[in-house]
Image (cartoon, rainbow, N blue to C red):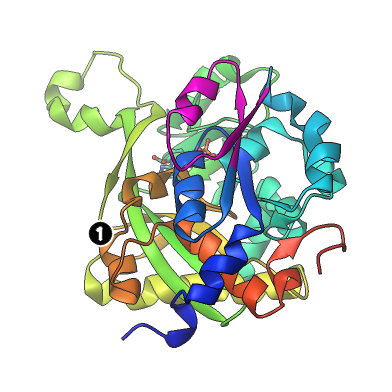
Amino acid sequence: MIAPELLPTPAQQQVGDFYTIATLGSHSALQILKGARDEGFKTLAIASYETERLYRSFNFVDEVITISRYQDFMSLVPELEERKVIIVPHGSFVAYLSLEEHKRMNVPYFGNKAVLDWEASREMQRVWLTKAGLKVPRQFRSGSEIDRPVIVKLYGAQGGKGYMFVRDAADFERRAGELTRQNYVLQEYIIGVPFYIHYFYSPLTGKLEIMSMDRRYETNVDSLGRIPAAAQEGMDVSPSYVVVGNSPLSLRESMLAEAYRMGEDVVRVSQEICPPKGLFGAFCIETIITPDAQFYIMEISARIVAGTNLFIDGSPYSYLNYSEPMSTGRRIAREIKNALLSNSLHAVLDDGGSAG
Ligand code: ATP
C-alpha cells in the first residue's frame, strides 16, 4: 500500500499551479520538467540558442528563456527572484556555476547548498563516507607507495575522461610524464561491477527511498573483455573510462538491505556535518561491487544524476512504492508539493533564508 502522505490529492494539484519549477536545459531537465508538470507545476526551461527548439518541442515545457551560454545563468537571477520560481539543480549546475555563484543566488533552490562543499572536495567526501562506515578504495600519497593496481583520477574530470589505469609503482614511474601540471589522486583499482544507486531522502517524512539503479557503459574499459587477454598482449591498449551511456540494473535482493543502509548512513552523517538539514532529496552513491559482495564507494553525487533518465516512466523499485510512474524528477516535484501543502517549504529549499 502507498503511504497516504505520498499520494497527491486534488488540493495538492492546485497548490502546484501557483509555482513554476525551473531548471537548465540539459542533463535531466526533461525528466525534472515532465515530473513537475505531472505534479501540477508550471515549468520553465532555461535553454541556450542551440537547445531552445528542443525544449520548446515538448508540450510539458510551458516557458523557455534563452541565454547565450549556460555560464550566463546568473544574469537571470534578478528576474527569477521576482517570480514564484523554484530551481531544481542537476549536474550541469555544478558544471557551469561555481560554488560561490550557487551560494549567491537567492532563488528558492531544491536542496541544501551546504552539502556542495562536502561534495566538491574529494578529501571531504572521503571523510563523510568514512564517518558513515562505508568502504572507500585506498589512496596513495605518491607513486612510490603504490603496491597494487591503481586508477589515476584527474581532478575536475567529467565522466572519467583522462583517467589512467596503472599496474604498479614501476608502471606509474614510466607514465608519470603524461600527468605533468595536472592534479590527480592515486586510488586503489577495485575490480568488480560498477553499480550506481539512486536514492531519495524526504525531509518531510524522514524516509529514504531507493528510486532506481544503473551502470555506466564506458569506452573502452567495458569492451576490453571482448578481446581475449592473450590477444591483448603487445597491443598497447590502455583502458579508458569515458562514459557513453547507461543501462538499468536491479540488485540481488539479498544485497538491497546493505544498499539501503548505506543510503541511511550517508544521510545521517550529512546531518552531523551540515546541520541541521544535511543531505536531502535525490542523491546517488557510486559503488563498485567486488566478488565477495562488498560495496566500495567511488563517489557520492548530492543531486539527481543522469542515470535516472532511464527511469522517466519509473523503475521496478519506484513502482514498489508508488504503483504509478515515478521518476526521480517527479519525486522531487512531489516533495515540493507536499512541502507547500504542509507549509514546510523551508524544509526542502535553500534560499538564503527567505523561503516561507
Ligand atoms: P562523474 O563526475 O561524471 O561521476 P568522474 O569523472 O567523477 O565522473 P568517477 O565516477 O569517479 O569519474 O569514475 C569514472 C569511472 O572510472 C567509473 O565509472 C569507474 O569505471 C572507474 N573508476 C573510478 N574509480 C575507480 C576505482 N577506485 N576502481 C576501479 N574503477 C574506478
Residue at image coords 28%, 74%:
320
83 to the left or right of 303 = right
Q: Is residue 62 above or below residue 329?
A: above
Q: Is residue 28 above or below residue 343?
A: above
Residue at image coords 69%, 17%:
68
Q: Is residue 43 above or below residue 340?
A: above
Instruction: From the image, tell me which residue sits under label 1.
Output: 291
Residue 337, percent from left and from top: 58, 68
Q: Quadrant of the N terminus?
A: bottom left
Q: Is ligand 1 less than 8 Å from the beta carbon at label 1?
A: no
Residue 296, percent from left and from top: 43, 58
Range of the magenta residues? 44-66
Residue 239, percent from left and from top: 35, 26
What residue type is disc 1 on?
A: Pro
239 to the left or right of 89 = left
Residue 238, percent from left and from top: 35, 22
Residue 203 visible to an observer of this rendering: no
Q: Secondary structure at mark 1?
A: loop
Nearest to the observer: residue 285 or residue 41: 41
Nearest to the observer: residue 279 or residue 93: 93
Nearest to the observer: residue 312 or residue 148: 312
- For residue 186: magenta? no
